Amino acid sequence: MRSSASKLSLCLLMTPFVLWIVLLVLLPHLQMLRVSFHVRESWDTVTLGLEQYQNFFSESYYWRTFVRTGVMSLFTTFLTLVIAFPIAWYIAQLARGRAKGFLFLACLIPFWASELVRTYGWMILLRESGLFSTWLQALGLADGPVEMLYNDAAVIIGLVYNGLLFMVVPLVTTLDGMDENLVEAGYDLGGNHWTVLREIIVPWAMPGVVSGCIVVFMLTLGSYLTPILMGGKDSAWFTEQIFTQFITRFNWEQGAALGVLLLVLSSVIVWLGLRVTGQNLRKVMG
Amino acid sequence: MASDLFCTDLVRRFGDHTAVDRVSLDVPAGTFFSILGPSGCGKTTLLRLLAGFDRPDSGEIQIRGARMNDVPPNKRPVNMVFQHLALFPTMSVGDNIGYGLRRQKVPAAERTRKIARVLEQVGLPGLEDRNPQQLSGGQRQRVALARCLVLEPTLLLLDEPLGALDLKLREQMKVELKHLQKAFGTTFVYITHDQSEAMVMSDQVAVMRQGRFDQVAAPETLYRNPATPFVAGFVGDNNRLSGDVISVDGDLVRLRLQSGEEVAGRIAGEGIATGRRADLFIRPESLVMNGAVPDGYSRMQATVTTTLFDGANSRIEAGVADQTIFARLPQDGSVSNLSPDSAIQLGWDPQGATVFAGEPV
Ligand SMILES: Nc1ncnc2c1ncn2[C@@H]1O[C@H](COP(=O)(O)OP(=O)(O)OP(=O)(O)O)[C@@H](O)[C@H]1O
Ligand SMILES: [Mg+2]
């Protein structure tokens, strides 16, 4: 009697979760996977085939953008990690009492605005008639207006900024639990700054590093607004091409194939990352 | 004997609180030196100055004659066993011990050999591949020791390393630490607030109070000849009886207690004069009871409050006027059937009691 009641409550609890997984995750992806193998022969006949994937490999523009997006996302993730680590260390280990909460909040504040507004913020600073350009001219460091937007560096700045919080939070969480005596012991036994960082702090922070990197990498790979708004003609992002296929060209088959490829890319890189760092998902996600 | 650690007038202030106040110490090579004091008296602060995690505001630290004030912790020939051990949780036991050796660029083969040997010396052979989390409290303790001892430091600092262990294990580790210190011949500076740890293990004990050393002496001297009332009360159990000085005769002094009785003790501090207040300290184990009180002893009437049976350490609690006094029950059971409220005569050898000038009322 009791066990059937608890089974029922378990079912009730699980239902929304299962519905979510099936309806919003599994079904659309399976559908997309199916559509990506469609080959349209005439307006109403469809056969199965690999044409969309062949297109991807034969059209160099596709796979170049694909590789570029992957490499730039990796670089952005790495840069975010390098910037976030000292911030997280400061918040977790050095800041005390109210300063700690305040700093954490300060990291959160930009995320009260949408990605669009955040990106416009950077555009105001970086564009030809923007603040930085004006200052450079006022200081006499530049003769004319300087355009800092519409290149890869601008895109990376925007992406790092968007990802920073998602790197800082898991890092602070892991570093917070670290006994400060561990660091002192590291020095006491003869280590210098570099060895203490490499052998003691980083291994301890590894779960946070990996989970932060996974989140930031996926966010970056799938971001759309920032690369479009801040990137130049040559800095196309792969999501842009998916958008173009679906919306502009109305070529759902091609769009679906590109979408599947992006999913495969992110899965493979995350899997590789976990393998290389010797972590597993269960450990990283707590 | 050459001294391994020599400090003069160390001072460390936090705001207007002086945590370490003009501390000087001299620790001969190969000895076990303890710093004993109540919680918050500045022990950890002092140890961190020695380890180099903190800088003194003034004073000098010398290790084997070399000035250490400006040497960073990783360059000092000093290692520390932390209060909570601070074993690296991401490394195996072997890597924990190997960490310091790798910093010293010891080749891999020799490193393996040294790790195996030190683990054997601390009684944990073959545990290199375990994780520190898989060890018991006492085993972790030994790994923390091995991690330092393998580097053969001039000086090993230990910050209440037994505090986290249960009573039984603590008793066992006390003796073992002493043996390890002898076996390695390393100079130990050991911090504790537990007087029995300090007494059992040390060659020399410094009793610290509010940032200062009250007395630095061998355990037996501290026990028999405390230099201050604080030492008398803190080291070992002691009874304290307050009274007025009525006469001084050589090194003996007679006091009149509040109960009106006259007792005697040995002068141990400055400022004792007829008519002044004074405190007499007498240990529970120095008190004899009833018929056993020989001639020439000070004696005093008391009323038994209760008997506290604890095997070899059984005591009675008795009241004298409004003061409480503890007396050790003789082992042979010669004093028995002391019912509450019965009268009892307590006596002691005046040479075994110490008298200090009391605080002015
Ligand atoms: N970083 C600091 N800033 C301000 N005050 C401090 C600091 N470290 C210690 N103190 C103060 O110095 C005094 C001595 O502290 P310390 O930690 O040395 O005590 P302790 O003798 O080790 O005590 P315990 O036996 O409880 O460990 C305390 O009153 C403490 O509040
Ligand atoms: Mg302490």
Image: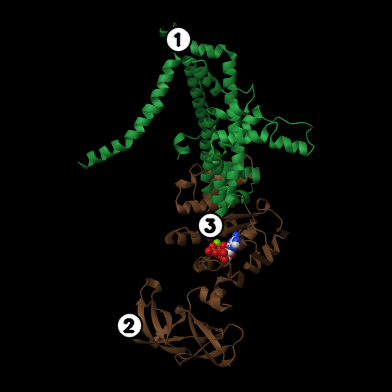
Chain colours: A green, B brown
At numbered mark 3, what does the secondary structure look like: helix, strand or loop? Answer: loop
Foreground tag (1 vs 2) = 1
Q: Residue at x 59, y 26 (%)?
A: A228
At numbered mark 2, what does the secondary structure look like: helix, strand or loop? Answer: loop
Where is residue B343 shown, x and y percent of the image? 36, 88
- Report the residue that reaches farthest toward the top: A42
Q: Amino acid at mark 1?
A: Val
* Mark 2 or mark 3, earlier in chain: 3
Question: Distance between the Cα atoms at labels 3 and 1?
Answer: 70 Å
Dot 3: within a 10 Å radius of its alpha carbon, few (fewer than 14), some, or many (20 or more) residues?
Answer: some
Is B317 rendered above or below residue B48?
Answer: below
Dot 1: within a 10 Å radius of its alpha carbon, few (fewer than 14), some, or many (20 or more) residues?
Answer: some
At numbered mark 1, what does the secondary structure look like: helix, strand or loop? Answer: strand
Q: Which residue is mark 1?
A: A39
Q: Which residue is mark 3?
A: B83
Where is residue B206 shown, x and y percent of the image? 59, 69
Is A258 rendered above or below residue B250?
Answer: above
Q: Is mark 3 within 8 Å of ligand 2?
A: yes
Q: To which quarter of the image does residue B7 belong?
A: bottom right
Is B319 rendered above or below residue B157?
Answer: below
Q: Which quarter of the image is occupied by the C terminus of chain A? A: top left
Where is residue A123 shown, x and y percent of the image? 64, 33
Question: Distance between the Cα atoms at labels 1 and 2?
Answer: 103 Å
Look at the numbered discs 1 and 2 and tell me whether their residues touch, using CB distance below 8 Å: no
Question: In the depicted view, which residue is nearer to us: B93 or B133?
Answer: B133
Q: Amino acid at mark 2?
A: Pro
Q: For residue B340, which numbered disc appears in the image?
A: 2
